[in-house]
Structure formats: structure tokens, C-alpha cells
Image (tube, helix red, strand yellow):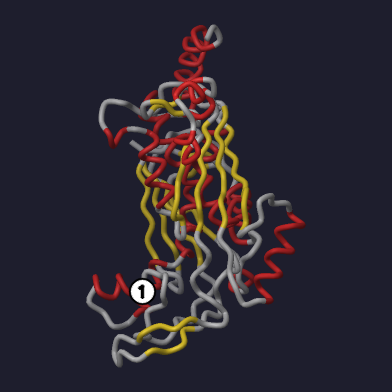
């Protein structure tokens, strides 16, 4: 069973992450992990804070001579931004502040912001890098891309840069939709026997757990209900690679909708929980959009869930053992799938 856990705050000394149940013998270069972290950190639309972060990290256990040992892997990720904001009783609209302050009985919104911050997703990418590498070694290719930005229907590097500049000048923020694909997945990952073992449910939980994600769909998603049963039957790709909670041998296709960043440079009105008077809540560190960074995080969260599903299906305490079983299964199922 693959398990992972993160700890740490946005302006704390470190973010900490542990991944357990990872097989031995997976070679991974620290430069590979650094490159994945850089993709998240320098994604289009990021705030000035990202220029201060270097995402310097240290692997303190579970790795020897460049390969995993089978022991729990622990990663420490250094935070460059260490100046903790002053206490504030002003919850920012659209953030975790208000429900968090009520839940944890505090009038200091900063205590909630520190853990709820999207900074924590850097550790999810660090841990997800191990899973991404494992998927690669097993012949599974996972990718992400942004398909809409604000009202922009077609996203290119040039059109995105122009749209982001326009929003920045207007003191506004943008949402968008990102897409994740996974090719080369063996059929039969997941289960139809219990609701919480369905792979679609697990992927939905992992992806909607990303900061700012407000919508999730598989394959045809929200457009599929507009079709008739006959029309849908003629388009098997609408399944998005999942039937009955299990992979069916087709490419996995997932999409997530990311809301506009709620923190605005020009500020929004908020109610102070000490005085109950309205004040202008100004954000100086908000991204112009989170969708590009969220796509990278989504890719790594998908990798973690798929790695877990692969290990559940095939077992194996080492990569050679796991790979042998995956290859044998592919050979067996391909005899049927290629005749369909």
C-alpha cells in the first residue's frame, strides 16, 4: 500500500513529506525532482514570491546510491520566504480563512493560511516525482496541459502571456481548465467491488484536493449527458479510460476546473472578526492564475494514485519484481484487447 503525508507551513523552516510503500530499485536523480519542482514554481501566472523560492530540498531517508531502498522516503523542502505575516483577524474571502478560524477556534487567520497555503503543493510535487518516475519505468506516460484560461478558448504560450498581462494590468485574476492524460496503463487497475476502491473516485479525491480546483470530469464528463445512448456507444473514448472504476486499456483522460485566484491586488471587502467592521483586504502575493501550476500538481497527484493502483494490483517489493508482473499482465490482456 502506497501512503504519503506532508507537514509544514508556508513560512516555516521546511515542508516535510514522507512516502511509504514505495518499491526498492527505482533510480531517481535529484535533478529530476528539481526539474519537476521548477515546473510548478515557474509556471505562467505566478506571483513575485516564486522568485524568492528556490525549492532547495534534501532526501533524508529511503534513497541509497541514487535508488530507492524500500524504506519510507523522507523529503525536506526548504522555504526561502521565512517572514511570518503579522496576526490578522481579517479572513480573506474565498480562502480557507473563515471556515478555518471557526473550526479551530482562533481569531488569527494567519494560523490557517500558513497550512492551507498552496505552498504545500510543492511537497506533493516532490513526492509525486517518485511516483511519476515509477510510472515512466513501467511504461506509463503521464502529461498535463492547460486547455482554457479565463475566456480564452484556445491556449498557446503567446495567447496565455497576453491574457495574463491584460489581467495583471486590470488588477484581476483568471481561472482555467487543465487536462491530464495517462497512456500505457494496464487494464484492470482499480476495482468495481467497493465504491472507495474505484480508481475514478480516488483520482477525483486527489485532484479536487488541489487548492482552487472546483470541478472534475473523466473523459466525456459533463458533455456526455447531452448525447443519446446510441451516440455515446459509438464513442468509446468518452469513457476516459475508465469503466466501472477500473482502467480499460484506453488512454486515461481527466480534466479539472480551477477558479480565479480570490486574492486581488486591488483588494476586496472583508469583515474583521474582532470588530465586525468591513475592511479592504489587499493581496500582494497572489498569483494572476493558478491553473498552470495546478496542472503540474495534478500531474503528480495522478502519478501518486496510479502508482498506488499499480502496486495494489501487482504487488512487488522491488522494481524488477513489479515490472515482471506488469509485463506478464500486459502480454496476457493484450491478446484479448487487440482483438476487440
* Quarter containing the N terminus: top left
Residue 114: tell me if it is visible.
Answer: yes
Q: Secondary structure at mark 1?
A: helix
Which residue is drawn at the image coordinates 42% and 29% (left, top)? 310
Q: Of 26 and 255, which appears nearest the observer? A: 255
Q: In the rendered view, would you say 143 is above or below 257? A: above
The residue wearing badge 1 is 97
So how many labels did they put on this image?
Answer: 1
Q: How crowded is the residue under tag 1: few (<14 C-alpha within 10 Å), some, or many (20+)?
A: many
Quadrant of the rendered image containing residue 60? bottom left
The image position of residue 104, as x and y in percent, is 24, 72
The image position of residue 147, as x and y in percent, is 62, 48
Which residue is drawn at the image coordinates 48% and 81% (left, top)? 268
Q: Residue pushed farthest right?
A: 158
Q: Is residue 338 left or right of residue 205?
A: right
Q: Of 202 and 161, which appears nearest the observer? A: 161
Q: Of 188 and 235, which appears nearest the observer? A: 235
The image position of residue 266, as x and y in percent, is 56, 82
Q: Is residue 238 left or right of residue 6?
A: right
Q: In the rendered view, would you say 195 is above or below 171? A: above
Q: Of 53 and 178, which appears nearest the observer? A: 178
Q: Is residue 6 left or right of residue 45?
A: left
Which residue is drawn at the image coordinates 62% and 77% (left, top)? 171
Residue 316: tell me if it is visible.
Answer: no
The image position of residue 36, as x and y in percent, is 60, 51
Amino acid at each position: 500500500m502506497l501512503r504519503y503525508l506532508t507537514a509544514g507551513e508556508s513560512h516555516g523552516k521546511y515542508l516535510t513529506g514522507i512516502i511509504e510503500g514505495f518499491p526498492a530499485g527505482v533510480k531517481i536523480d535529484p535533478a529530476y525532482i528539481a526539474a519537476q519542482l521548477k515546473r510548478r514554481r515557474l509556471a505562467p501566472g505566478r506571483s513575485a514570491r516564486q522568485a524568492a523560492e528556490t525549492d532547495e530540498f534534501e532526501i533524508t531517508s529511503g534513497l541509497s546510491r541514487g535508488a530507492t531502498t524500500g524504506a519510507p522516503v523522507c523529503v525536506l523542502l526548504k522555504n526561502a520566504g521565512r517572514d511570518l505575516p503579522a496576526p490578522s483577524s481579517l479572513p480573506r474571502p474565498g480562502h480557507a480563512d473563515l471556515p478555518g478560524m471557526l473550526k479551530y477556534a482562533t481569531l488569527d487567520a494567519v494560523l490557517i493560511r500558513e497550512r492551507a497555503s498552496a505552498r504545500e503543493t510543492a511537497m506533493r510535487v516532490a513526492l509525486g516525482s517518485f511516483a511519476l518516475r515509477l510510472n515512466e519505468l513501467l511504461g506509463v506516460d503521464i502529461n498535463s496541459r492547460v486547455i482554457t484560461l479565463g475566456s480564452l478558448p484556445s491556449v498557446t504560450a503567446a495567447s496565455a502571456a497576453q491574457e495574463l498581462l491584460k489581467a495583471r494590468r486590470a488588477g484581476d485574476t483568471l481561472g482555467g481548465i487543465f487536462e491530464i492524460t495517462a497512456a500505457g496503463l494496464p487494464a484492470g487497475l482499480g476495482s468495481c467491488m467497493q465504491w472507495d476502491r474505484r480508481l475514478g473516485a480516488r483520482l477525483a479525491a486527489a485532484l479536487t484536493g488541489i487548492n482552487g480546483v472546483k470541478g472534475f470530469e473523466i473523459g466525456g464528463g459533463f458533455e456526455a449527458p447531452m448525447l443519446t445512448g446510441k451516440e455515446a456507444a459509438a464513442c468509446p473514448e468518452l469513457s476516459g479510460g475508465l469503466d466501472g472504476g477500473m482502467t480499460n486499456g484506453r488512454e486515461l483522460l481527466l480534466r479539472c476546473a480551477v477558479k480565479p485566484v480570490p486574492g486581488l491586488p486591488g483588494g476586496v471587502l472583508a469583515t474583521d472578526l474582532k470588530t465586525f467592521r468591513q475592511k479592504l483586504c489587499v493581496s500582494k502575493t497572489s498569483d494572476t492564475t493558478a491553473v498552470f501550476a495546478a496542472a503540474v500538481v495534478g500531474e503528480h497527484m495522478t502519478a501518486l494514485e496510479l502508482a498506488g493502483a499499480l502496486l495494489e494490483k501487482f504487488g512487488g517489493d522491488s522494481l524488477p519484481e513489479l515490472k515482471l508482473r506488469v509485463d506478464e499482465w500486459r502480454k496476457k490482456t493484450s491478446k484479448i484487447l487487440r482483438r476487440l
